[in-house]
Image (tube, rainbow, N blue to C red):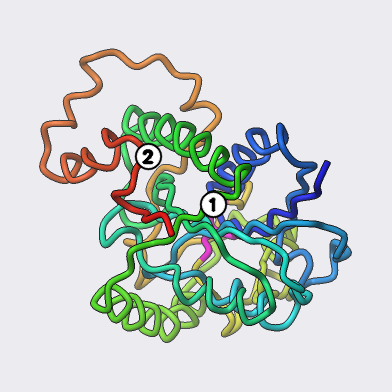
Amino acid sequence: MKKLALFIFSGSGNTRYLAELFKSNLSQSFSVEIKEIDKIIRNIDPFDNDFDMAGFIYPVHALNAPSIFYDFIKNYLTDGNGRSAFVVRSPGDPFFDGGSCKEVAKSIQKKGYEVFHESMIVMPVNIFLRYKDPFIKEILEAAKKRAKAVRREIASLTPAKQNASFLLRLITFIASRIESFGAPLFGKDLKVKNNCTKCGKCANDCPTQNISMIPDKPRFGWKCIICMRCIYGCPVNAINPFVFSFFKLKKWYNLKNIESENINNAETEYRNRKFYKMFEKYLKDKYSAKNHREV
């Protein structure tokens, strides 16, 4: 059985959930191993170049891949030597098609990989607005269906590329540059409450090693990428932004718990609201050429 390496980055855990879906589905056709890129960069996990195909799954930050993903591709990913690869981007909403993945695909191709498939699968957002639990469950159900459809295309090496217009690529470029400028400011805005236990989990988990422990509390540097891992991963909820307080969701969620919840009709009245109606096309459309074109 051919070996498939899934290179992923997950800040708050949602993309990791998606990667597990892909692993479960693709294990029918490949021997699958999930490789977390920040652990490779930080020398926590060894890099094993023994694989036949590569998959790249990342969360969307300002319509683009997070900067750490480009860093990994450029400086740590080994040469592809013609190996096949696919790209899956995971935005918190389907607006603007979730952003363009063209730059990611180009970066991977420069390393000698043949990117034959690009796709988008929405996961619940982790900043600004917390979706209602029934809606999160709908998103998860859609993710499962799309992951199965993508698995069939990947297993059969069916080409599918994103239709990225010039306008979409331009908007993605501008948004990601703004985010790159603002992310370090967000990191310096983080404050630690008095209930901090000084356990060091935030420093150990930080993908960019932006957090250091001083005698009384964590200290934040200038390498933040707004992955939110330290905030939502804190056991005592001690880390909070001050000026950027609107970024943090008031109540974090557990996808596994929401997945198992029973939802009744009374809890789905949100569907009539304008914001949620904007998701209808994504949730109702079958996996089709709407977001991909076969080549």
Residue 175: horizontal and vertical position, in percent? Answer: 33, 77
Q: Which amino acid does label 2 sit on?
A: Tyr
Q: Which quadrant of the view contains residue 164?
A: bottom left
Q: Name the residue beneath numbered marker 1.
A: 232
For the residue pair 155 and 226, the one nearer the viewer reads as 155
Mark 2 nearby-residue class (10 Å; few <14, some 14–19, many ≥20) = some
For the residue pair 10 and 224, the one nearer the viewer reads as 10
Q: Which residue is drawn at 65% across and 76% down?
A: 210
- The span shown in magenta is 227-232
Q: Which secondary structure lies at badge 1?
A: helix
Q: Is residue 252 left or right of residue 281?
A: right
Q: Which quadrant of the view contains residue 204?
A: bottom right
Q: Which residue is drawn at 35% across and 73% down?
A: 243
Mark 1 nearby-residue class (10 Å; few <14, some 14–19, many ≥20) = many
Q: Which quadrant of the view contains residue 123?
A: top left
Q: Residue at x 28, y 42 (%)?
A: 282
Q: Is the C terminus in the top left, top right, bottom left or bottom right quadrant? A: bottom left
| Earlier sequence position, callout 1 versus callout 2 | 1
- Is the residue 56 above or below the residue 107 in the image? above
Taken as a whole, is the magenta stretch helix, strand or loop?
helix
Residue 183: horizontal and vertical position, in percent? Answer: 46, 78
Q: On residue 242, which mark appears?
A: none
Q: Residue at x 77, y 76 (%)?
A: 79
Residue 195: horizontal and vertical position, in percent? Answer: 59, 54
Q: On residue 287, which mark appears?
A: 2
